[in-house]
Image: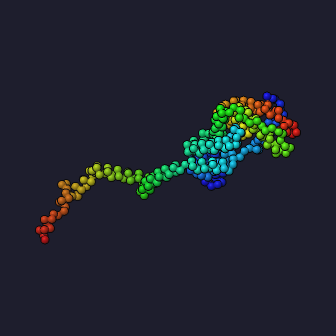
Amino acid sequence: MTDDPSLESDLDRMFRAARADAPEPSAALMARILADAEAERPRARQVVPRRRRRLRSAAMSALAGLGGWPALGGLATAGLAGLWIGYSAPAELETLTAGWLGTQGYDLVDLVPTADLYLQEG
Amino acid sequence: MAKDVVEAASDEALLVAYGRGERAAAQALTARLAPMALRVAARMLGDPAEAEDVTQEAMLRLWRAAPGWRTGEARISTWLYRVVSNLCIDRLRKARAQALDAVPEPADGAPGAEARMQQAARTRALEAALMRLPERQRQAVVLRHLEGLSNPEIADVMEIGTEAVESLTARGKRALAADLAGRRSELGYDDD
């Protein structure tokens, strides 16, 4: 063990010389490393997302044909409104038809002549 | 990935690109990291062929780690220094179990007057002295004085505290200086 400062600086000069004289990988070693990299290079990871993307894009293009998400919202609202109108019979409409056609009203069969009537005339 | 984009990309971006299957990223990473891995392995092991094997093994582990690499968690260079160091220490321990006195003595004989030869002789003397250090001191000295890492970076690589790194490098340097003290004139330091 020594505390000689001149030796410290000798050592620093040796470190510097060693850094300048560092070993470098041969072309053969680089080729071996790259061959490993090629053998290990992930490939399957590329395929899975692509398939998923294809399935998703089929659904998305069908939706786009209808006009996208806003149109789908409008379509759903219109459907529900139609359903509601169909189930709740508006009383005002019945009053109107009774005013025109009499309180008893008519059935569909009353308005359409029967086949017997045509036969009688012919 | 275009060539200039590859050259400008960080190690981490390149590893993520390799994990997605980009071949060019592996080439860029090899060019950047393999020399670093080989330098450390060569100085830790003192054997070029073993150092090449360790470099290839460490890089193979990097390729295998790529798909699951969690970004922002560790610097790739730190990770690789750690893998290389640990592989070297494993090999040294196995070798020591087989032959305790395998550490080479520096070559005898004064180097020639030519400066280049003298520099090579100094480097050989330093490498031989490094091989006589305990493994952890050698690792710390190589990372600090030959690779130029900071003490906190070395602490990360060696998974110890910064104070322990300082202690290891200081002891290592003192031991090297003592080892080389008797060879000053032989290595031409009296003439400098």
Q: Can you see residue A40?
A: yes
Query: Vertical placement of A6 versus A52: above or below?
Result: above
Q: Is residue A26 left or right of residue A81?
A: right
Which image quadrant is residue B72 in?
top right
Query: Vertical placement of A70 versus B54: above or below?
Result: below
Total of numbered circles in the picture? 0
* Residue at point 64%, 54% (across, down): B3
Q: Can you see residue B149?
A: no
Taking depth in this image into account, of B17 and B43 the one nearest to the observer is B43
Residue at the limit of the structure toward the bottom, as seen here: A122
Residue at the limit of the structure toward the left, as seen here: A120
Quadrant (top left, top right, bottom left, bottom right) of the N terminus of chain A: top right
Q: In this view, does B184 lie to the left or right of B100?
A: right
* Residue at point 76%, 35% (across, down): B105
* Residue at point 84%, 37% (across, down): B186
Residue at the limit of the structure toward the right, as seen here: B191
* Residue at point 64%, 38% (across, down): B87
At which x and y percent is residue B55? 65, 43
At which x and y percent is residue B116? 82, 45
Taking depth in this image into account, of B11 and A74 the one nearest to the observer is B11
Quadrant (top left, top right, bottom left, bottom right) of the C terminus of chain A: bottom left
At which x and y percent is residue A105? 19, 56
Which image quadrant is residue B157 in?
top right
Which image quadrant is residue B68 in?
top right
Taking depth in this image into account, of B50 and B155 the one nearest to the observer is B50
